[in-house]
Image (cartoon, rainbow, N blue to C red):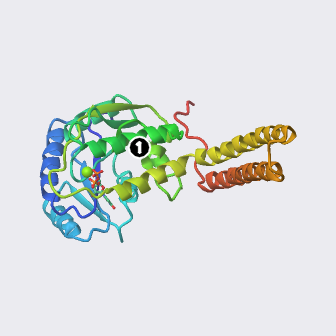
Amino acid sequence: MKNKEILYLVIPCYNEQEVLHETTSRLTEKLNNMINQEQISPDSKILYVNDGSKDNTWKIIEELNASNPLIQGLNLARNRGHQNALLAGLMTAKEHADMVISMDADLQDDINVVDEFVKKYYEGNDIVYGVRSARKKDTFFKKFTAQGFYKLMLMMGVDLVYNHADYRLMSKRSLENLESFKEVNLFLRGIVPQIGYQSTIVEYERNERFAGESKYPLKKMLAFATDGITSFSIKPIRMITTIGILIFLASICMALWSIIQHFRGVTTAGWTSLIVSIWAIGGLQILAVGIVGEYVGKVYLESKHRPRYIIEKYLK
Ligand code: UDP
Ligand code: MG
């Protein structure tokens, strides 16, 4: 059974008419090589997911599907964003494939490491993460914001693989388990490590886009980061509680200090009571918001209906 298993490449596409032909020829060559070397089954495919593109992307996918036996297409009813398009592709591919690799349409992620992904899969890994070894070719701005993003996420307690985007291999059973994560706000990079199973990383160098432009402007990146943090962590709520407690403690110190000042007779009448109430009420209010937040956070986490465990093996 080992070797010659079916590999699917899942590629979300949003307005990618400039890159599709080139991407297809590079990937077709890659897959055919791997099929000829008997690394993967001849039933392996490339699955393009059209994420409601406004240009000719879907028309090109239809043409490619008609002319190239390796190409399949999935058309979403409208634009749902990269993560949702990717999930649609993964869930479709898992019905036919033994392993699935997700990558971007612009092939910025080096496709030469696909062999290595597959090798690691045959060695028994269910998930193989592609990790960028260096960011020599990124602009300073992209590098700075992207690395800041990982640091912030780790600080917020989100379990992430550092410098890993969505270039990864997943086995059929890990995809089946991914399906049991029911949340609507999808942040795959955070969810996949939660599945567990044996996993490993493969390093690669990330290239520039060979055509077309990035569909991830700063605004989308910020929204993505906010989504990532608020989907996995209630630390921001905890911070509010902490601030509340600190201010309330400060108010007690202020109270003592202003009472001393009062008896030393260096204050104007009314100042003491005023200043102490401002601090105490402020602190108590923030603390109260934090406590309410704790419950909101619990409700939020419950409402995701995430699986409580995933079984790796059952010996019988
Ligand atoms: N993408 C998508 N839907 C969107 C935005 C992007 O499917 O709403 C796809 C896009 O076609 C590409 C991948 O997501 O295959 C990554 O986008 P891009 O290369 O623009 O991001 P960057 O590499 O600049 O971060
Ligand atoms: Mg890109």
Tell me: 280 left or right of 240: right
Query: Percent from the top left, x then y, of residue 91?
Result: 40, 55
Tell me: 306 left or right of 268: left
Name the one closer to the observer, 244 or 85: 244
Farthest-out residue, top = 123
Tell me: 69 left or right of 234: left
User: Compared with residue 76, is residue 239 higher up or lower down, i.e. above or below?
Assistant: above
The answer to whether residue 169 shows anywhere in this view is: no
Tell me: 124 left or right of 134: right
Q: Quadrant of residue 133?
A: top left
The answer to whether residue 115 shows anywhere in this view is: yes
| Residue shown at the point (42%, 40%) measured from the top left | 150
Name the one closer to the observer, 129 or 2: 129
Number of numbered discs on residues: 1
| Residue shown at the point (70%, 54%) measured from the top left | 289
User: Compared with residue 120, is residue 279 higher up or lower down, i.e. above or below?
Assistant: below
Farthest-out residue, right = 263
Ligand 1 image position (quadrant) = bottom left
User: Compared with residue 95, is residue 201 higher up or lower down, i.e. above or below?
Assistant: above
| Residue shown at the point (19%, 54%) measured from the top left | 70
For the C terminus, the image quarter is top right
Element carrying mark 1: helix
Residue neighbourhood size for the residue with mark 1, other residues' Cα within 10 Å, grouped as few (<14), some (14–19), many (≥20): many
Query: Percent from the top left, x then y, of residue 311?
Result: 55, 37
User: Compared with residue 86, is residue 62 higher up or lower down, i.e. above or below?
Assistant: below
Q: Amino acid at mark 1?
A: Phe
Query: Percent from the top left, x then y, of residue 236?
Result: 59, 47
| Residue shown at the point (75%, 44%) measured from the top left | 248
Q: Can you identify the residue that label 1 sits on?
A: 149
For the N terminus, the image quarter is top left
Query: Percent from the top left, x then y, of residue 19?
Result: 16, 57
